[in-house]
Image (cartoon, rainbow, N blue to C red):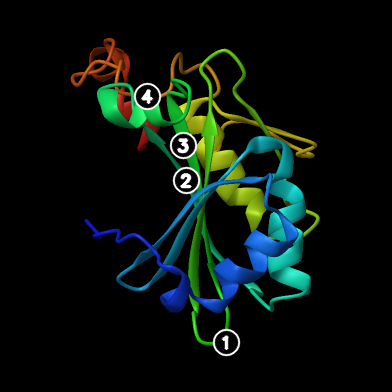
């Protein structure tokens, strides 16, 4: 787990200064972390911020897209208007003083849709499908948003906190001999 520390004006990383100048209304919070910075943005500004990071600030490498289910973390829920999920993007640049940035987007349980970023990074295709499969978060504009890890007939999303630890009977119904023959 990384420790976040409050950023003061004289120690603000350049990437945070640039994001604050260009997207003041779109940033919900920012912090410096051990290996870079973490920024929480609103969903409406997500695509524009990621596009700016890639084209203008040279964050050319998308490392990961995932999500976090904060349903058991009351303090975290209260911070962002009870948005149960946080979609997380990890980016890297080979230039500049802050090579890593984590972009987090609060997503409410009633509106599980964020924009797809396949137009920015082709590698987002698999990562968005994985996040959809495991958490049920939909990526608007994704050309083929369907399960990638679980069988198509699988019900539910196994990385949600409300999914039973022992599953819903999948182990008993799965025929190992037939599937692995």
Question: Which marked residue is nearer to the observer: mark 1 or mark 2?
Answer: 1
Specify few, some or many for label 3: CA neighbours under 10 Å numbering under 14, 14-19, or 20 or more: many
Quadrant of residue 105 in the image? top right
Label 4, label 1: how far apart the Cα atoms are? 36 Å
Specify few, some or many for label 2: CA neighbours under 10 Å numbering under 14, 14-19, or 20 or more: some
Mark 4–mark 1 contact, CB under 8 Å? no
Label 4, label 3: how far apart the Cα atoms are? 13 Å
Label 1, label 2: how far apart the Cα atoms are? 22 Å
Label 2, label 4: how far apart the Cα atoms are? 21 Å
Residue under circle 1?
94
Mark 4–mark 3 contact, CB under 8 Å? no
First of labels 3, 1 by sequence position: 3
First of labels 2, 3 by sequence position: 2
Residue under circle 3?
86
Residue under circle 2?
66
Quadrant of residue 178 in the image? top left
First of labels 4, 3 by sequence position: 4
* Residue 159 in view of the camera: no
x, y percent for residue 17:
60, 70
Residue under circle 4?
78
**Horizontal side, residue 27 vs residue 155: left or right:** right
Question: Which marked residue is nearer to the observer: mark 4 or mark 1?
Answer: 4
Given residues 3 and 130, the one toward you in this image is 3
x, y percent for residue 38:
45, 58
Specify few, some or many for label 4: CA neighbours under 10 Å numbering under 14, 14-19, or 20 or more: few
Image point (60%, 50%), residue name: 126
Kindly state the secondary structure of the residue where label 1 is placed. Answer: loop
* Residue 11 in view of the camera: yes
Image point (29%, 10%), residue name: 168
């Amino acid at each position: 787990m990384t420790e976040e520390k409050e950023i003061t004006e004289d120690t603000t990383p350049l990437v945070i200064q640039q994001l604050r100048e260009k997207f003041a209304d779109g940033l919900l919070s920012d912090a410096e972390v051990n290996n870079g910075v973490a920024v929480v943005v609103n969903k409406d500004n997500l695509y524009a911020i990621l596009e700016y990071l890639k084209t203008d600030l040279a964050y050319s490498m998308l490392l990961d897209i995932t999500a976090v289910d904060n349903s058991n973390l009351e303090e975290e829920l209260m911070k962002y208007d009870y948005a149960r999920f946080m979609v997380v993007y990890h980016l890297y640049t080979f230039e500049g003083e802050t090579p890593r940035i984590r972009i987090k987007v609060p997503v409410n349980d009633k509106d599980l849709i964020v924009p797809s970023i396949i137009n920015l990074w082709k590698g987002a295709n698999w990562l968005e499908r994985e996040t959809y499969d495991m958490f049920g978060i939909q990526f608007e504009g994704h050309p083929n948003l369907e399960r990638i890890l679980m069988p198509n007939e699988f019900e539910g999303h196994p990385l949600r906190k409300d999914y039973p630890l022992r599953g819903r009977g999948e182990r008993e119904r799965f025929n190992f001999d037939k599937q692995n023959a």
